Image: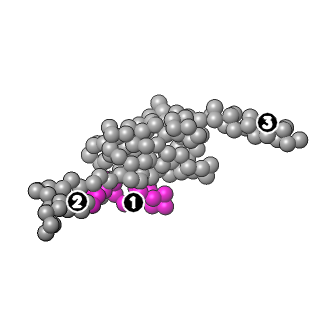
Amino acid sequence: MKFKLLTFLILVIFAGCSKNVPLSGKVLDEDGNPITVGTVFFSSEQGLSRARIQSDGSYAVGTLKDTDGLPPGKYKIYVTGAEVGLAPTGPPLVDSMGQEIPPMGGARKLVATKYTTEANTPLILDVPVKGNQYDVRVEKP
């Protein structure tokens, strides 16, 4: 009985995987500039999928594997980790003993706060998408 149940579950999982829709695109700000770091999430009642944003703003979303796509359905889209460290300017700081003081860095956000949580994001996508391409457009902070 356990073997039959395990076999059934494996078949259901693999059958579900074949229904995924490949989805890729770019994450862009309101001026069309790419967001170059972070993760874009696709959340639905079926679960959560994600894609790492590449340095050119591109992404390819995955559910069970990195780029295996999404099952059809409605998704809320949000972006996290989209910030860059501030580079130090001017000469290095030195303490009284002549030791260089590491720069105190902050981070510059690339995406408006409303796009960074599932609860607040206004972005909703109905998969499948024509051409399997979807550019995520967000406002700057």
Mark in front: 3 vs 2 = 2
* Three-letter code, disc 1: Lys
Q: Nearer the viewer, residue 29 or 9?
A: 9
* Three-letter code, disc 2: Pro
Mark in front: 3 vs 1 = 3
Q: Is residue 113 magenta?
A: yes
Across and down, in percent, residue 104 comes to 24, 62
Which mark sits nearer the N-terminus, 3 or 2? 3
- Quarter holding residue 21: top right
Report whether residue 70 is seen: no
Q: Which residue is mark 2?
A: 102
Which mark sits nearer the N-terminus, 3 or 1? 3
Most common secondary structure along the magenta stretch: loop
Q: Quadrant of the C terminus?
A: bottom left
Report whether residue 134 is seen: yes
Q: Residues within 10 Å of mark 3 (few under 14, many from 20)?
A: few
* Three-letter code, disc 3: Thr
Q: Residue at x 13, y 69 (%)?
A: 96
Which mark sits nearer the N-terminus, 1 or 2? 2
Q: CA distance from mark 3 to mark 2?
A: 57 Å
User: Considering only vertical position in the picture, is 85 above or below 10?
Assistant: below
Q: Which residue is mark 3?
A: 7
User: Considering only vertical position in the picture, is 6 above or below 90?
Assistant: above
Find the residue positioned furthest to the left: 91
Q: Residues within 10 Å of mark 1 (few under 14, many from 20)?
A: some
Residue stretch rendered in magenta on the structure: 106-124
Q: Which residue is mark 1?
A: 114
Q: CA distance from mark 3 to mark 1?
A: 43 Å
Q: Secondary structure at mark 3?
A: helix
